[in-house]
Amino acid sequence: MEASVILSKCSIHNRTFGIRIEKRNNDWGRTWAFKIDEEKAKREGFDQTKITGSLDASPDYPGCPYCGERYGFVLCNCGKMSCWTPGKEAGTCHWCGVYLNNLVSAESFDVSSGGL
């Protein structure tokens, strides 16, 4: 089984967390999430993870460890992701500071954890 960790930020608390992902039928599934500080994430090499494809939540995925959001996430043009409350249409990327509006779900994408 192919598995990895990507980084995300909580869109409410602006805190970094790791998401364990597993490759399933040529797509990725989110299976676990955990709090992690950026220095430790960098030491573990989680800031180097890059994936392409869909990113569904498995039934046991616990969601963001800070706000509890299980399904909503947004991918910024900077290539990094944050949890996101469904129905929220705009906000600021906590990675790069760009204002995001007219948010929509993507079927496939490229996620990069680089550049902590």
Image (spheres, grey):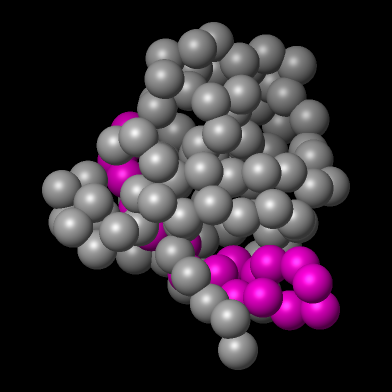
Residue 110 left/right relative to 31: right
Most extreme residue toward the bottom is 1
Report the number of discs: 0
Residues 62 and 97: in front is 97
Work out which quarter of the rendered image holds the C terminus and state it.
top left
Q: Residue at x 34, y 64 (%)?
A: 34
Give the quadrant of residue 86: top right
Q: Predominant secondary structure in magenta?
A: strand
Residue under the image location 44 percent in, 64 percent down = 5
Magenta stretch in the rendered image:
13-30
Q: Quadrant of residue 85?
A: top right
Nearer to us in this view, 61 or 94: 94
Quadrant in the picture for residue 109: top right
Residue 70: x and y in percent read 58, 58
Say whether residue 31 is visible.
no
Would you say residue 99 sits in the magenta stretch? no
For residue 22: magenta? yes
- Indicate the position of residue 108 as horizontal and vertical percent values: 79, 48
